[in-house]
Amino acid sequence: MFRPHERERRAGVKPFGAIRALSEEEEERIHETMLRIVSEVGLRVENDEMVARLSDYGARVSDDRQTITFAPEFVEEFIAQSEKFDWENVAEHHSEGRTHEHPVTIGTRRGGLLARYC
């Protein structure tokens, strides 16, 4: 047990320093892999309104109108724009998701190294 004066002295000490879950190289590798996946494989979008909106913004739409692919430049521009956005003032929206076991919260900015994807 610490004595009161020791507790005060230790309160501001971070014995392990900053902890990084991923190195910069690992984060960059994840980013490059994500760019490759969204440009080559794409995402399945089943909402016609969302397909139309993404198409208007420059996303490529497959013939079946359900798979969307994005040029890496499109994604990079989106990330750059989102970093300027005032995420703190976005209202949260809660959804039950497909099952009640996995609720979804949209509209919050999460911290961490990969915050720009959240």
Image (cartoon, rainbow, N blue to C red):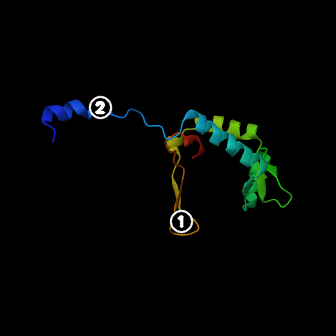
Give x and y (percent) for residue 70. 76, 45
103 sits to left or right of 10: right
Nearer to me, 10 or 98:
10
* Rendered residue at 63%/36% (across/down): 28
In the picture, residue 30 is in which quadrant?
A: top right
Nearer to me, 13 or 118:
13
Nearer to me, 5 or 78:
5
* Rendered residue at 78%/60% (across/down): 66
Q: Quadrant of the N terminus?
A: top left
In this view, 77 is above or below 56: above
- Seen from this angle, which residue lies furthest top? 9
In the rendered structure, which amino acid carries the disc numbered 2? Val
* Rendered residue at 72%/61% (across/down): 47
In the picture, residue 15 is in which quadrant?
A: top left
Q: Are marks 2 and 1 in contact (CB under 8 Å)?
A: no
In this view, 24 is above or below 88: above
* Rendered residue at 19%/35% (across/down): 7
> Could you tell me how many numbered marks the image carries?
2
- Element at label 2: loop
Which residue in the structure is indicated by mark 2? 13
Disc 1 crowd rating (10 Å Cα; few below 14, some 14-19, many 20+) is few
Nearer to me, 21 or 46:
21
- The numbered dot on residue 96 is 1
In the rendered structure, which amino acid carries the disc numbered 1? Glu
Foreground: disc 2 or disc 1: 2
